Amino acid sequence: VFCPLRAAAGTRAASPRGHPRARRAAAAMGSACAGGAARAGELELRHSGGSGMSSNLSSPQFSDIDLVVAVTQRSVNATMLQYLHEIGQTAPEVIRCYVFESFGSSTILEIDHQTLVKNAHGSDPFNVKDGANQKDPDVMNLGNALFVGAFKAKGGLPKVPPSELPTIVALSLHSDSPVTFTLTSSEFQVVGLQYVGFGGAVATNRSQPEGPGAKPWYFQFDVDMAQVATNPGADVPPAVRRRIDDLVASVGPGAFGVQRLLLELETALLTATPVIPGISDKDKLKPLWQTMSTVFTGAYFDELKRQGNPVFNYTFTTTAPPSRSTLALRAIQHSTSPYWAGGQPTASSSSCLAYLCTTQSQPPNIVPFPWNWVSAEDTSQVAGVVSVRRSDFADWLEQEMSSASAGLCYDTSVRLTHHGENYHIHWGVTSAKNPEWFKVVEPPAAASGGGLVTLKMAFAHQASDSSSDSLSSSSIYMDFNTYVDGRITFQSTKIILWVRVQVEMGFHHHESFAHYNDLPIKSYYNKAHTVTYDLAVSQQGELKLSMTSNIDNDSCDWDFHAKGLFGLAGIENELQNGMYHFQARLNTTLDGMFTHYTTRLTSILNGYGQWVFPGADSFVMHNVGFSDTCDLVTQVTYADPGMKASLGIRGGDAGALDALRAAQTQEAPAASYDFR
């Protein structure tokens, strides 16, 4: 006879412990995400259907880069022009005056403006006539006060038509070459005395030209952006340390904002020699050049280098809260990414300033990107892109899904015993002791429907047992197995999760020299779930997933047929009923488990485990998807509505700032570019 059955109810698996989030080495790609081929280390220029689609950070030469923020020269200049115009309204006036240490000395000292006027018996250097000589009382008084020169200036944009404004930042053709930074001012007056002969002096007093056709004074610097690689924990000279501390305190985490960029450029320019276009020592402006090079780019810049202060005493504050970010970025390197046309790098407004970001403490190496970050036709509406290395996103997805995925795994058990001529059968399912979960595969494999299979899961647990009666006249055999197979595909704007769960059962017995297969071993539960997540991104950089699902049921019909003498005598009836009802309960449990799994997974990925792009305090994000090689890419515009509107402005071809200011009061229309 067969004794009553006992089947243990399955429970959800606990989270796997000791699960590492390992950084995987780059490997060859088997296929392109949106169709076509991709190869490891591919260096030829890639052309693709949208901004960011050519990103291939998984190529080995970019192994130390986790994320790239690339913004176009056009957007940087448009935003910088808008920003400089705004701060020019409230920028502090910088006044510096200089005198000789003593008669006959060449040592120049700074002196307070009011003290200088007092020493010069009331003569103000800024009121002296241009070209006046020692016969002028003011020139005589200033000469007796050992006056060298003075200037007063305010940051911002010069008072010229917008179409005549310069390009503030000009990117170079090579990734590690300096960029040209043009420092402008809204007001600038410089005055000085040129001492000639014995007791002679000639005054120079000039102000920056204004109005149409004017030639304002620009200070151009070839700035090595690599010198401002950001690593807050690094040892740096005291002046630069204070400057970095000031950046952190006043700007906060806005590492990709135009405020931070302006301060970084001004930090780096202290190591460069400025050029003042149109003013030199070889023309009629020689006195102006001599005065400017003595008091401004000379004595004043020496002071800045010692103290690490901004040129025009800029200070910045922000009320925006620190933005969240899934990746804990620790170091940022700057690079130039030229625009490729006809297989050659070109100077273009679509060239990009690239922030190379890493989670390591050492800034990444500068390596050329053989693709365009932003397509030329997108530059009027897209400021740039944020691209995440495929393995970083896949590692994050593995970590977030590990616990829920492990819950799909069950251990089966079978124990067959006998006592005399009585058989005892026990079987059940419990949470897997050693579950599996979705794990990143490198290199990824091409998916049949397009895209790359980036994570896989495989679990199997088999249980079987047999027993013979005491007379060895009969024996029974049972198999009870579970299998889980899954894959995750990155494809265009989708994450496609496919999981198949199978449960096999089989029972056969032997009696009187005959063998009977009562329950052929088959998959009496065999269902494949396809869950498709469509990607979207909030303006704050939060990845949003909307889910659709489909179930393919390939389960075999229940096929237990009692046979032989056992069947004729009804000995297997209780076993047959028990196995049937157990399988039915198990099927219901597994169906519910799948529903719980997808609900839980969606809740995690849209909730506390949500992916968040960095830079939300500087950008508005939109149009997220996977590149051809499945880097995760989102397009960005600058966060301020006025800055978004200003994308239509080109350096040197600006359009009216009045219209630009008006645009600040309305929201610019969002760009709409699909990943294909």
Image (cartoon, rainbow, N blue to C red):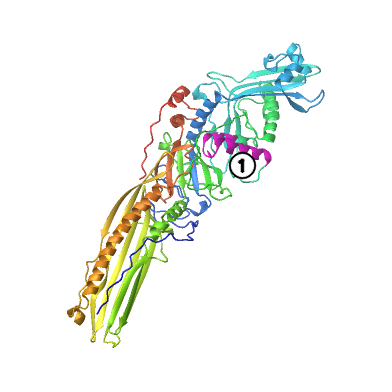
Task: Please identify the quadrant where the N terminus is shown.
Answer: bottom left
Q: Which percent across, then down, holds residue 569?
A: 18, 80
Q: Pick whichever, 484 or 229, lies toward us.
A: 484
Left or right of 335 on screen, residue 532 = left
Left or right of 641 on screen, residue 114 = right
**Residue 450 in view in this figure:** no
- The chief SS type of the magenta part is helix
The tally of labels here is: 1
Left or right of 66 on screen, residue 437 = left
Q: Which percent across, then down, holds residue 380?
A: 42, 33
Q: Residue at x 28, y 80 (%)?
A: 423
Residue type (three-letter) at the residue carrying disc 1: Gln
Q: Pick whichever, 638 or 422, lies toward us.
A: 422
Q: Residue at x 29, y 87 (%)?
A: 472
Left or right of 284 on screen, residue 39 = left
Q: Pick whichever, 209 or 400, lies toward us.
A: 400
Residue under label 1, please give it: 227
Say what secondary structure mark 1 lies in. helix
Magenta-tinted stretch: 237-265
Number of residues whose C-alpha sits closer than 10 Å to that of mark 1, classed few (under 14), some (14–19) or many (20 or more): some
Q: Which percent across, then down, holds residue 118?
A: 75, 16
Q: Which percent across, then down, holds residue 491?
A: 36, 51
Q: Is 218 drawn above or below residue 231 in the view shown?
A: above
**Residue 182 in view in this figure:** yes
The residue positioned farthest toward the left in the image shown: 568
Q: Residue at x 25, y 82 (%)?
A: 510
**Quick check: is 239 in the magenta stretch?**
yes
Q: Pick whichever, 171 or 325, lies toward us.
A: 325
Q: Is 346 drawn above or below residue 111 in the view shown?
A: below
Task: Please identify the quadrant where the C terminus is shown.
Answer: top left
**Quick check: is 109 in the magenta stretch?**
no
